[in-house]
Image (cartoon, rainbow, N blue to C red):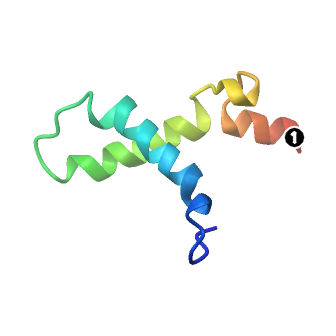
Amino acid sequence: MSRVGRCIDNGPMESFWGTLKCEKYYLHKYDTYEELPSAVEEYIYFYNHERYQERLNGLSPMEYRAKAA
């Protein structure tokens, strides 16, 4: 991914960050900068292990990966 001159390669990450902003960042008030990195890490764990996704047949990414293996 992220080949020079290939903006389409960045689409999945742009989508992820947009989802993170809508579901986590804009819904909370962070009093200090130090709270933000831990909130992002928490959301990444949630996104990969707990958040069910319609495009994965209602499974979380980790469940989908385990089922595919």
Judge left or right: residue 52 versus residue 44.
right
Judge left or right: residue 19 versus residue 34.
right
The residue at the far bottom in this view is 4
Q: Amino acid at mark 1?
A: Ala
Residue 47 % position (x, y): 53, 37
Q: Residue at x 22, y 46 (%)?
A: 35
Residue 17 % position (x, y): 43, 46
Can you say whether 69 is above or below 63 in the image?
Answer: below
Judge left or right: residue 33 versus residue 6.
left
Judge left or right: residue 28 versus residue 9.
left
The residue at the far left in this view is 31
Comparing 15 with 7, the one in front is 7
Quarter where residue 2 is shown = bottom right
Can you say whether 9 is above or below 56 in the image?
Answer: below
Residue 27 % position (x, y): 27, 27
Q: Residue at x 60, y 69 (%)?
A: 6
